[in-house]
């Protein structure tokens, strides 16, 4: 195949990626979009394989077979609740692949003739190594946190910001040396090593509930690393695809930050969710004393019996309790009795953007029942019963009403405006922000202390009996 | 320099296209967006294939082959899991 034909095929592939992403603008067209995107990838791979530069295929085939088997088995087996880990690790692999490709191209160029290495090549190689290294190791830590291998807490130590700053400077210095002396390939690997440590240092101090932001940011980094590798190889399809992914991750990151009313710097560096939070026993006891109304499944079933409109508000607790199917059963039962049922989903509920939607879709909840925050907030005043399951900070009225709390200014779901709120929760423990929730003490709020799944199953049974 | 400007142009325009297209993705599809874009970032596989196949040196072959494994996991895993997820989003029948 002539080089022009190859480039044309890459252009087709890049266009298919854009069409694929465009398909994601609606659930109806999304499946087709994803297939178009996959077709683009297939075309790109095939034209690359028939490129004349390739002299031996066995390593390529071995790599594709191994990677394909791992990817396929993993993708088909992974439970939907573990999707944040899956995406987290994939970000890391993307970053890792970019570093390796940039490294291989650099080694080859340096062996051929280091004198002819251009500035563009040098800068792009170092950028790919730096971003990719941070992405790979940062993603492994994010995966570890989500999987429970690494502490979910925000782990801080004295001088950690200074240390990160020093590592960043050292990484940049090694990169500059590598650009100035391209014949010394060791600078590249030193920089990748420094970037790896930096990636670990950056993610370790970020708490579990901030993972949606981290995953989105690492998603963006993996795209930027791919784009940088595109500059190394002067390859347009890599640049275009990398930019698309980089933009996507960036948009998601800023949506997540906005939904928490926090800056990216605050999420990355403030260490929210460390050991200091969560011990606020004193004021919480005053707030809850004598005001919290504990209820039973039977009592809630009675309230639901006269309800015409019920809204569910799921949070990470629903994912932990694997309660999405039980929730669907209850929703179906209520709908069968003529109740209007909706699900109100806060953008940062769960551990990654869109986490709750995927879980509920898995449980066969139709997507037109899933409402995003702004739309949901128009409906709470007309809602008879709101059932909060495994969510806390995203329904804390302090975020709206109080002046000086860690949550102040964060947009919340105004569940307290509905006639009755039922909160299913194991205990009165605070959410990630570490502050008590006055909702639990409100006059219209009932607490059902139980495991999420069991509680919802008992509710369904109780509703059935009435 | 001319070539650098040309590909910088492509880069900047692609970022704009990315922003335009992705701001239209609704929040309910944000997880499939992430897994689908992960699959797209697996495009580094084409660089990996060239490194693994040109057999320039042992080191480049090793690096290239490792990159093929990583990138293929992303491509295959990313598209399959996205397809699996998107199949779940249904309207009330």
Image (tube, grey):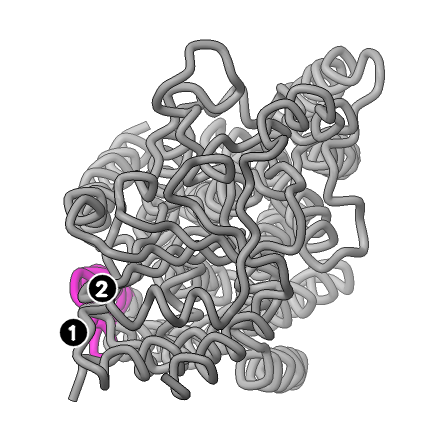
The residue at the point 62 percent across, 19 percent down is A270
Given residues B52 and A2, the one toward you in this image is B52
Mark 2 and mark 1: span between their CA atoms?
7 Å
| Highlighted magenta segment, given as a residue range | A7-33
User: Is residue A20 positioned above or below B4 on the image?
Assistant: below
Q: Quadrant of residue A63?
A: bottom right
Q: Position of residue A231 (x, y in %)?
A: 42, 42
Residue B39 appears at what percent x and percent y? Answer: 43, 66
Q: Is residue A112 visible from the viewing direction of this image? A: no
Q: Which residue is mark 1?
A: A29
Q: Magenta region's main secondary structure?
A: helix
User: Outermost residue toward the right?
Assistant: A158
Residue carrying label 2: A24
Give the number of marks.
2
B40 over A404 or under it: above or below: below
Q: Which quadrant holds the C terminus of chain A?
A: bottom left
Q: Secondary structure at mark 1?
A: helix
Tell me the residue at 17%/47% (across/down): A375
**x, y percent for residue B10:** 24, 41
Whether A194 is drawn above or below A61: the answer is: above
């Amino acid at each position: 195949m002539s080089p022009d034909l190859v480039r044309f095929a890459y252009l087709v592939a890049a266009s298919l990626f854009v069409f694929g992403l465009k398909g994601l603008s609606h659930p109806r067209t999304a499946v087709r979009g994803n297939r178009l995107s996959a077709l683009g990838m297939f075309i790109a791979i095939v034209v690359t394989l028939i490129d004349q530069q390739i002299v031996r295929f066995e390593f390529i085939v071995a790599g594709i077979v191994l990677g394909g088997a791992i990817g396929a088995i993993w993708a088909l087996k992974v439970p939907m609740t573990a999707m944040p880990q899956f995406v987290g690790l994939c970000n890391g692999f993307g970053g890792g692949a970019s570093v390796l490709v940039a490294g291989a191209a650099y080694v080859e160029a340096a062996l051929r003739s280091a004198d002819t290495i251009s500035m563009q090549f040098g800068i792009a190689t170092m950028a790919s190594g730096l971003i990719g290294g941070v992405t790979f190791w940062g993603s492994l830590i994010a995966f570890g946190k989500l999987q429970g291998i690494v502490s979910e807490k925000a782990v801080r130590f004295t001088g950690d910001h200074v240390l990160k700053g020093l590592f960043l400077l050292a990484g940049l210095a090694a990169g500059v040396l590598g650009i100035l002396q391209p014949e010394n390939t060791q600078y590249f690997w030193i920089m990748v090593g420094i970037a790896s440590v930096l990636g670990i240092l950056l993610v370790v101090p970020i708490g579990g509930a901030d993972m949606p932001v981290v995953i989105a940011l690492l998603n963006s980094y993996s795209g930027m690393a791919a784009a940088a590798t595109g500059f190394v190889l002067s390859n347009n399809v890599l640049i275009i695809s990398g930019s698309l992914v980089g933009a996507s991750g960036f948009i998601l990151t800023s949506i997540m930050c906005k939904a928490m009313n926090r800056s990216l710097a605050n999420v990355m560096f403030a260490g929210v969710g460390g050991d200091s939070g969560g011990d606020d026993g004193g004021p919480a006891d005053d707030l809850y004393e004598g005001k919290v109304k504990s209820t039973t499944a039977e009592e809630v079933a009675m309230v639901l019996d006269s309800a015409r409109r019920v809204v569910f508000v799921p949070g990470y607790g629903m994912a932990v309790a694997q309660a999405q199917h039980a929730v669907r059963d209850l929703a179906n039962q209520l709908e069968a009795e003529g109740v209007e049922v909706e699900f109100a989903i806060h953008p940062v509920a769960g551990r990654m953007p869109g986490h709750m939607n995927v879980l509920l879709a898995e449980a066969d909840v139709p997507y037109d029942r899933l409402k995003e925050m702004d739309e949901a907030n128009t409906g709470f005043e007309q809602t008879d019963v709101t059932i909060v399951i495994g969510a806390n900070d995203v329904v804390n009225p302090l975020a709206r009403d109080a002046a000086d709390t860690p949550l102040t200014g964060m947009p919340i779901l105004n569940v307290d405006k509905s006639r009755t709120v039922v909160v299913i929760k194991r205990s009165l423990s605070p959410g990630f922000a570490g502050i008590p929730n006055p909702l639990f003490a409100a006059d219209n709020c009932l607490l059902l202390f139980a495991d999420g799944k069991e509680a919802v199953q008992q509710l369904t049974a109780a509703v059935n009996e009435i | 320099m001319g070539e650098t400007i040309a590909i910088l142009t492509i880069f900047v325009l692609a970022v704009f296209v990315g922003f335009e297209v992705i701001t239209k993705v609704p929040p309910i599809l944000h997880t499939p967006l992430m897994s689908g874009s992960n699959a797209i970032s697996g495009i580094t596989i084409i660089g990996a294939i060239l490194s693994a196949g040109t057999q320039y040196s042992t080191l480049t072959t090793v690096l290239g082959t490792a990159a093929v494994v990583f990138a293929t996991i992303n491509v295959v895993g990313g598209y399959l899991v996205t397809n699996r997820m998107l199949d779940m989003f249904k309207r009330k029948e």
